[in-house]
Image: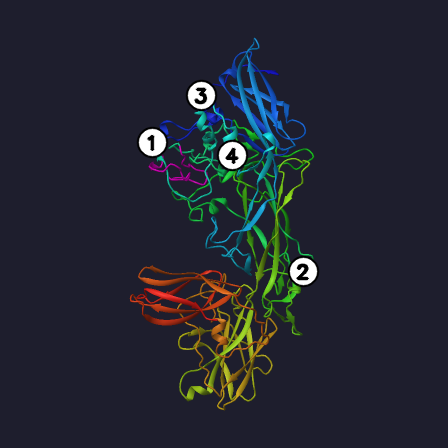
Amino acid sequence: MRRLGRLRLSLAFLACVLGSALASGPAAAQGPPDPQTTNIPYLAWRGEQIRLVKCDPAIGEEGASVDWLVEEWTGPGLKPQIETSTITGFEDCVAADIVSLEPGLARVKLVVSDESGTAILKHQFLSIWMSLNKPSIDEVGQADPTGNSRLGDPPGDGIFTAGDLNGRIQVKVTGTFPGHGGISYTLPDAWPALASVLADDSDSDPDNNAARWDIHDDLAKTEGHVSGYCGPGTAVVDAVDNCKLPSTASGPFSRVYGDSSGPNTVGPFDPLVLSTLLGDGNLNAGDAPMPAARVDVQIAKNTGGTDIGGVGSLEPADKAEVYSRDTNGTASAHNYYAPFYSAWIPATSRPGLSSGIDGPAQGNNFRGFLVDGQYDYWEFAEVLRSEVARSTQCLRRTDQAPAYRQTPAGPQNVAVYTDEHGEAQVEYNPGTGAYYDAVGAIKNDNGGCDLEDVDLLGRSVITATARYPYQPVSDPAKASDPLTKQVKSLFTKYLGYFTKGPGTANSTARIVVAHAQDVDGRAFANERVCFFVDDEADGAFGFSGTTGPANARFTVGGSDAPLLGNAPVCRYTDANGNAAVEVINSDPQSINVVAYFVPEGILRDIDVEFGTAATPTPPGDFDDDPPARGAEGTNPPTESVLKSVGATSVKKKAKKAVSSSIRVARLVKKGGKVYLVVKVKSNVRYAKLRVKVLNKHGRKMAVKTKRIRTNRTVKLRLSAKAQGAAVSIVR
């Protein structure tokens, strides 16, 4: 027992420290409830100490004394311990730390007595320590609640191409503790059930006590507001968003009480800090004030030899972007939802009067928290392992540095902290680094490393391990199931040819185009390509200009390059990775043309037919589908266009059984233009569509075919008069 004297600080100062709400509107007159009159539990992980604080004028009475005792414990082993050295009193408040290494619920009684020993205040705290459960891990897809169109694998299937946009990994952590009567509770889902059993409040209707545990919003994007701060709203459940400007990711946020949280809303929930009270009018799992758990997300390390695992790297995800309605984190009204976006770790590092998870952040012989102060979700608290790029023996280009392809680089094992909903997200960058010596590339005596037949560059096996965030306990860390990602290659070198034009005179010439692109689909620009032409040909010279079939014309640029050996023509590829030679021959025969991609040491050849008019029909031309991460203006002629007119490769890829289905097909009108928005799910990269364009009477206007990328949404331009379309896959 410790005696406390009245200090000189005033209650007015205390009220200022506790925080205030920015009230407006008629509903705000009532104001938010006082969380200190409700027994909202403090939640902690095993091994964490909870700072309990109670403020009341009775505590400051001259000669008042206080007692702390644990009245009830539902867990195994010893009751939680009050750390007596932490018992402190100031103004009209008293505080103490309590700790448990076991899971369970403790009822902690604070008794304040006057000089005569008469109890003048009794307050009961609920403190819960939880055991970590196995975390869940998931790839975020475009259709997921936090997905967007900027993800590198929109279906969320973990399949990327090298250099794709980042994907996102979602980790969720739950906690379990034994309650009364042997009933086990798992939070956050069991929060409403727990409230129905335990909730109590001195100022509330007993039939409505559980509603006082409504302290947070949920994760839904649903809009709608109560009347007051956001205007004359009619909703019962408030969206809890930044309905007014100016605002930032720290607020102010609307609340169901018709007011706002204030301009600096930083977690975690603290009954002493009214700005952290974000009730939305709906008691659900989202209200559980989940404590921050440490989560280590790691890509399994490459083991050498023939192992192609360990590609990609990890980057921080920004919660202010993930949980914004435009997915960009723009500071616009109603854009930020599902706060908090940052929190104090430990909770008592918050300036001013605070309660909750206590420190010090670091222990003497254990790590403790990896951060100490305000933490922005989900920044890396620590990078535990990072790979450094090293050169492989697979040549990329001798005329660029580094000449040899690189192994993966960047963070591959990182620690982050979960938010108040038990969630953390981390971005995955597939990159272009891989263990190229193990992927099965064909090498030649020129040093060439041919990746034409390599589909899978590498894989990443990713796990998330939930760890007790503060001190060791007798329960081990919990690892998720593995999440596997695959990184595919877009590398290709190929040749195709086109007739020079109609008529007999032009039948003696063919335009042979060489195309070169890297594993990420980017063009190999300014690369020296030398063309070796069969001696039977009448001649050959460099070509630049527009070529291709009538409905798929494209321009080839480039310039002459120094000759090599007996090659009659050497050219530098243009920005699209294309170089061309014009071959002349007046006899009806086949002329072989070999292209040597000099900086790569790679060969391709093609038999150019002069005995027949090479005029097959290429795919349609009513869409622009650039390669992944391709720079604007660098789209090469598609592989199907070139190969449809006779292109061959030195090696042929084995065909696999194709499974394709149309998942989205709808017409969209915008700015007087009509588009067909279509998405095909498939186990191959491309699919060929047949589109029957219909008028307002349902009659056919035109039929077009188009080769599109699968597993992503593609927009195809149609006639402005189109009123409908019938779409099918050409097998």
Residue at the spot of label 1: 25
Badge 2 density bin: few <14, some 14–19, many ≥20, Cα 10 Å: some
Mark closest to the chain's N terminus, 1 or 3? 3
Q: Quadrant of the N terminus?
A: top right
What residue span does the magenta drawing correspond to? 228-256
Depth check, mark 3 against mark 4: the one in front is: 4
How far is disc 4 from disc 2 in space, using C-alphas? Answer: 49 Å
Depth check, mark 3 against mark 2: the one in front is: 2
How far is disc 1 from disc 3 in space, using C-alphas? Answer: 24 Å
Is residue 535 inside the magenta stretch? no
How far is disc 4 from disc 1 in space, using C-alphas? Answer: 33 Å
Mark closest to the chain's N terminus, 3 or 2? 3
- The image shows residue 140, relative to residue 34, as above or below, that is below
Residue 193 got which mark?
4
Residue 713 lies in what quarter of the image? bottom left
Residue at the spot of label 2: 307
Q: Position of residue 50 (x, y in %)?
A: 59, 29
Mark closest to the chain's N terminus, 4 or 1? 1
Residue 683 placement, left or right of 248: right
Residue 12 got which mark?
3
- The image shows residue 712, relative to residue 18, as above or below, that is below
